[in-house]
Image: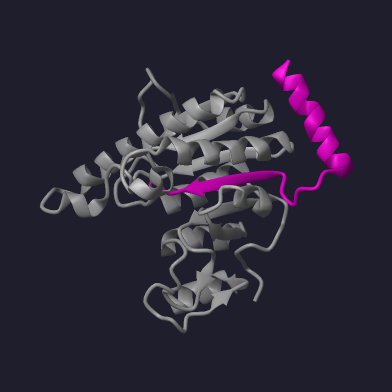
Amino acid sequence: MIEYEWILKKINIKIGGNTLYRRVLLKLSGEALAGEEKNGIDQKTISAICDAIVKVHELGVDVAIVVGGGNFWRGKYGQGMVRTTADYMGMLATAMNGLALQDAIEKRGIPTRLQTAIEMRQIAEPFVQRRAMRHLEKGRILIFSCGIGSPFFSTDTTAALRAAEIGADVILVAKTIDGVYTADPKVDPNAKKLEHVSYQEILEKDLKVMDSTAISLCKDNNIPLEVFAMSDAENIIKAVKGEKIGTKVDNNQ
């Protein structure tokens, strides 16, 4: 029944929908789930985020999510540890966040699948590209955890890679600031917000959006970014509808 309803929604979008994108990948930091607490998971915050994600899904848009783990573990906590061990601990933190998102979304009546790059079959599916595509076709929200399963790669790179693998039209990058600036606005009062910037400019000027590996992947695969503030969860919906709320990043100069 859910799959049938999803097909009808997709038909409606093609006839006269009001969304700019057909398939999106949302990049969420772990800190976004912590709210003002900065650590752990704030139920009020995750509830608002999942309400917005479900609204996007109800517009007939395919939704996939890559979530970080910074609310539980960051690399700086692992000083003195072997880097690979610290990175694997970070991957496990993303799995906890993935489970929290899955629980919150399914409580809203939307089927999900949590896929991990490290096998943990009791709680999630291993990532398989063909299976991921089928889940999206059936109207399920996909949640990707554990990065790409290898140390030394960030969840930014995971977002770029998974977006390419599932054929996403855009990566929605939800951050603590409302777009891309010429400098860090928290440090430089003269920093100016950019409505549009190219991947080449980001690499040349070392603008802090995503890490250089992720930016290069997006550039090579022509996947645009919409960078916006996560302070208001409704911004996710606005970004999908094409409203100008942050910064657009693509290959156009």
Residue 21 lies in the magenta stretch: yes
Decide which of 180, 91 is in the foreground and name it. Answer: 180
In the image, residue 16 sits, relative to residue 126, either above or below, namely below
Q: Position of residue 113 (x, y in %)?
A: 52, 26
Q: How many marks?
A: 0
Residue drawn at x 53%, y 76% is 201
Apparent side of residue 78 relative to residue 60 in the rendered image (left or right) = left
Residue drawn at x 80%, y 47% is 18
In the image, residue 205 sits, relative to residue 145, either above or below, namely below
Q: Position of residue 195 (x, y in %)?
A: 62, 72
Apparent side of residue 48 relative to residue 16 in the rendered image (left or right) = left
Decide which of 221, 188 is in the foreground and name it. Answer: 188
Q: How is the image coloured?
A: one colour
Residue 43 lies in the magenta stretch: no
Decide which of 131, 140 is in the foreground and name it. Answer: 140
Residue 215 visible = yes
The single residue placed furthest to the top in the displayed view is 1
The single residue placed furthest to the bottom in the displayed view is 190
Residue drawn at x 31%, y 44% is 39
Q: Position of residue 249 (x, y in %)?
A: 60, 66
Please report the bounds of the magenta region as a residue range: 1-30
Apparent side of residue 25 relative to residue 240 in the rendered image (left or right) = left
Residue drawn at x 36%, y 32% is 96
Apparent side of residue 250 relative to residue 94 in the rendered image (left or right) = right
Position of the C terminus, as image quadrant, is: bottom right
The single residue placed furthest to the left in the displayed view is 80
Decide which of 140, 49 is in the foreground and name it. Answer: 49
Position of the N terminus, as image quadrant, is: top right
Residue 129 visible = no
Q: Position of residue 138 (x, y in %)?
A: 67, 25
In the image, residue 83 sits, relative to residue 203, either above or below, namely above
